[in-house]
Image (cartoon, rainbow, N blue to C red):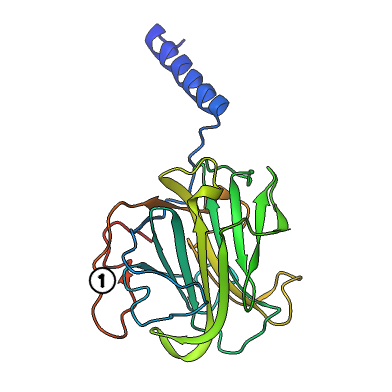
């Protein structure tokens, strides 16, 4: 028989879990974490590196090709101002343009509540060539409600251009996402990114190339996403005309 002390501890643990469940406190993520630096250089959302140092104040993260079905190579750049997230995905391995099958996306859990299914605070932004895109919204199921119009202030652009990472034309996508569109934006959020190319169209879900962050990211399952912390500090600007930003291997705040 359990002692009175052990029994009391068991009851306490059960109560804590029940309390957390009642509040919707989940906080289950992949364990991958990155810190989003404060921007010092303005961004023009045109789907390319407008200037050689436009993204040199950003954190650069290597997108993974190690997941099941992944292949290719690419980088994610991220930074923010006091009001807006900025992201760039440099999909360097896609060197032939297919406007109907080349995409990039960023996914945000603004309430930072994790979970096994995407809820209304979980949104995904998809690029489309050459400008614009769409937003998908979680519906408390294992999928999103796809194809929603972009909220006012969101800018997305994609181009087929060169970059500091690769001198041959390839897919690049840029995103500007205002903080104001999120009613419950936390200082740390759930986050994921992907860039993908389909042989013809993506309707069959078969990708010619796919790179993601984090490496176990699954589309509508927030517990497989990483975590992004909105930092109040900037990273040092890398000097030189071919700067590519601060790599996550140089930033102790980033773990992949």
Residue 41 appears left or right of 73: left
Choose between 199 and 14: the one closer to the eye: 199
Q: Quadrant of the C terminus?
A: bottom left
Indicate the position of residue 62 as horizontal and vertical percent values: 41, 71
Is residue 51 depicted above or below 136 in this figure? below
Along the viewing direction, whichever of 87 and 200 lies nearer the viewer: 87
Q: Residue 128: x percent and y percent?
A: 64, 73
Q: Residue at x 47, y 22 (%)?
A: 16
Quadrant location of residue 55? bottom left
- The x, y position of residue 125, in whole percent, is 60, 61
Residue 253 shows up from this direction: yes
Residue found farthest to the top:
4
Quick one: SS at disc 1?
loop
Name of the residue lying farthest toward the right? 203
Q: Residue at x 65, y 67 (%)?
A: 133
Question: Height in image: 121 above or below 60?
Answer: above
4 sits left or right of 239 in the view: right
User: In the figure, is residue 231 to the left or right of 11?
Assistant: left
Q: Residues within 10 Å of mark 1 (few under 14, many from 20)?
A: some
Q: How many marks?
A: 1
Task: Determine if residue 105 is in view.
Answer: no
Near-viewer residue (246 or 153): 153
Q: Residue 120's image quarter?
A: top right
Q: Which residue is mark 1?
A: 237
Across and down, in percent, residue 103 comes to 62, 73
Q: Nearer the viewer, residue 68 or 112?
A: 112
């Amino acid at each position: 028989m359990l002692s009175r002390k052990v029994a009391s501890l068991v009851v306490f643990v059960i109560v804590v879990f029940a309390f957390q469940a009642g509040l919707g406190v989940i906080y289950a993520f992949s364990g991958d974490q990155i810190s989003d630096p404060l921007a010092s250089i303005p961004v023009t959302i045109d789907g390319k590196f407008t200037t050689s140092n436009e993204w040199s104040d950003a954190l650069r993260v290597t997108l993974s090709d190690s997941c099941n079905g992944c292949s290719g190579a690419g980088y994610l750049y991220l930074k923010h101002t006091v009001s807006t997230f900025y992201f760039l995905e440099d999909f360097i391995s896609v060197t032939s343009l297919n406007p109907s099958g080349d995409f990039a996306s960023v996914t945000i859990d603004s309430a930072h509540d994790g979970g096994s299914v995407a809820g209304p605070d979980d949104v995904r932004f998809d690029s489309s060539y050459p400008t614009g895109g769409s937003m998908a919204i979680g519906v408390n199921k294992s999928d999103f409600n796809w194809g929603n119009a972009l909220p006012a202030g969101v800018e997305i652009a994609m181009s087929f251009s060169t970059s500091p990472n690769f001198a041959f034309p390839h897919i690049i996508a840029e995103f500007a996402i205002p903080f104001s569109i999120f009613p419950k934006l936390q200082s740390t959020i759930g986050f994921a990114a992907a860039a993908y190319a389909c042989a013809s169209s993506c309707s069959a879900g078969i990708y010619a190339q796919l790179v993601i962050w984090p490496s176990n990211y699954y589309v509508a399952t927030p517990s497989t996403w990483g975590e992004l912390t909105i930092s109040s500090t900037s990273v040092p600007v890398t000097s030189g005309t071919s700067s590519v930003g601060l790599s996550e291997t140089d930033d102790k705040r980033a773990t992949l």
